[in-house]
Image: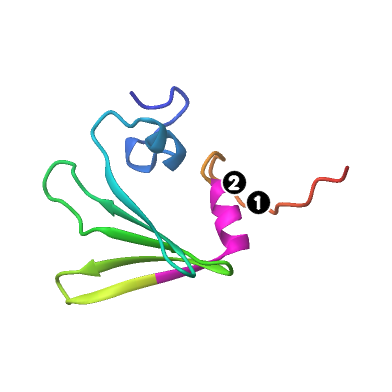
Amino acid sequence: MWPQNHKSPVAIPLAFVLRQVQHRAMFTIEHDFDATIVTIVDEGEAPLQEDVIISAFAECVTVEQHDPRTDRVHKVTFSLQQLRDLGAALDLPEGAYRLTPVEE
């Protein structure tokens, strides 16, 4: 089940996890005036997590999730560059990286 060259099932690459969709997934997509909003519902095995709300704006992307223990919503804001970096990082092994533009 885990990648052949991976040593620890605790820290498996996220991209590997994302490719292993073997269950039903529930999410909604809404297009508002200034953002696209995706809400992801946890339908896995208990304990379930609260819904994750991703709002994509022209200048940034926010990720929000309600914490029932504190009754607060936690929000993380990514710049578009940070989001591109995250996308690139999902398929890379552990390490430190600096991305540079590809020259044509």
Q: Residue at x 49, y 70 (%)?
A: 34
Give the class, few, some or many, for how many residues have Cα within 10 Å of label 2's Cα (few <14, many ≥20): few
Instruction: Kindly give the residue lying farthest to the left in the view shown.
Output: 46
Say which residue label 2 marks. 88
**Secondary structure of the residue carrying numbered label 2:** helix
- 70 to the left or right of 22: left
- Image coordinates of residue 31 in percent, x first then y, are 42, 60
Say which residue label 1 marks. 97
- Image coordinates of residue 56 in percent, x first then y, are 48, 62
In the depicted structure, whether residue 16 falls above or below residue 90:
above
> From which residue to which does the magenta span run?
76-89
Q: Residue at x 24, y 58 (%)?
A: 51
Quadrant in the rendering for residue 26: top left
Amino acid type shown at disc 1 = Tyr
User: Is label 1 in contact with label 2 (beta carbons under 8 Å)?
Assistant: yes
- 103 to the left or right of 59: right
- In the rendered image, the quadrant that contains the N terminus is top left
Calculate the distance from the C-alpha at mark 1 to the C-alpha at mark 2. 10 Å
**Secondary structure of the residue carrying numbered label 1:** loop
For marks 1 and 2, the one nearer the N-term is: 2
- Image coordinates of residue 94 in percent, x first then y, are 53, 44
**Residue nearer the viewer, 31 or 6:** 31
